[in-house]
Image (spheres, grey):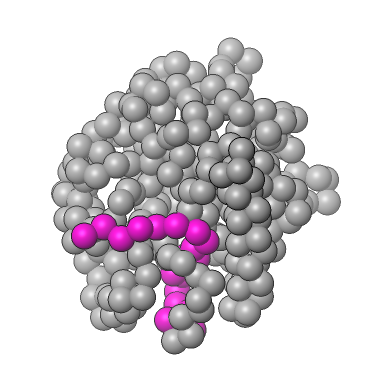
Amino acid sequence: MTRDVAGIGLGLRHDLATELLERHPKSVAWVEIHPENYIDRGGRYQEMLELAREDWPVVTHGLSTCLGSVEPFDASYLKELGAFLKDLEIPWHSEHLCLGGVDDRFFHDLLPLPFTDEAAQIASKRLTEVRDAIGIPLALENVSYYAPQGPDGLAEADFVVEVLERADAKLLLDVNNIYVNGRNFDFDPKAYIDRIPAERVVQIHVAGHFVRDDGVRIDTHGEPVPNEVYELLDYALRKVGPVPVLLERDNNVPPLDELLSEVDELWKIYRNATWADDAG
Ligand SMILES: [Fe+2]
């Protein structure tokens, strides 16, 4: 039976997993995993996943099934992914709205799509294909990018909405990515969130980012969450209601207590924003 995912979650990343599983902090309400780290892998990984499932609801977030690439998916991988997700009994799965490779080369990076009608058409078709293969709801995640778009494309928020509506899909709203893109490409992150259909949002990601000397912001998941991203989270939660929020930290991972103080801050924002929502 699917377990409820609510409140603040943390990624079950390898650097943290042993301590997280031993301490089982009460403030962590659920965990997120990358299926690529577990499929076809037994041993310690399988053991950690089983321990995590005893304590928490688990949600999955894929890294390799990029929705905007043009080459056919690996059908056998999609089958394996579907079986893995079914076994976990999770409420939804998410993948990135990006390009992951070309000519059989995988870049291990989330490359941006052109925000065009053609790209929206391709991505929505692929999203439907993955969703059919896994048999559960699929959310796309908005990504960060650093190359300017051509002059004829859509605004980023319009592009994301176009794909969501064509595919009738869910959204994993990454507020740090919106903030980073907004600062790098001079748009208002709150106007972006206003454009998003609230009822499609099933999950939120929050993270920190690196600010280069020239002011460019890089989505590293390697810094504490800055105040501006906390503020944008508050804004988003007031719009979309109490959807689960994940703290992403993949690099420069600090001691667990430091992350737990960020989790506490997220709870404060979550409770305030969603009470306000309830009251409104
Ligand atoms: Fe994210």
Q: Quadrant of the C terminus?
A: top right
- The structure residue drawn at horizontal position 36% and vertical position 75%, both measured from the top left corner, is 55
The x, y position of residue 19, in whole percent, is 49, 84
**Which residue occupies the foreground of this view, 204 or 241?**
241
> Which of the 4 image quadrants contains residue 126?
top left
The x, y position of residue 202, in whole percent, is 43, 44
Classify 56 as above or below 198: below
Report if residue 4 lies within the magenta region. yes
The x, y position of residue 269, in whole percent, is 65, 55
The x, y position of residue 151, in whole percent, is 63, 15
Viewed as shown, does residue 83 lie left or right of 198?
left
- Looking at the rendering, the stretch of residues picked out in magenta corresponds to 1-21
Q: Quadrant of the N terminus?
A: bottom left
- The structure residue drawn at horizontal position 31% and vertical position 72%, both measured from the top left corner, is 53
- Visible residue check, residue 211: yes
Classify 74 as above or below 251: above
Q: How many marks?
A: 0
Classify 152 as above or below 262: above
> Which of the 4 image quadrants contains residue 102?
top left
The single residue placed furthest to the bottom in the displayed view is 22
- Visible residue check, residue 74: no
**Which residue occupies the foreground of this view, 34 or 10?**
10
Report if residue 3 lies within the magenta region. yes
**Which residue occupies the foreground of this view, 109 or 38?**
38
- The structure residue drawn at horizontal position 61% and vertical position 73%, both measured from the top left corner, is 260
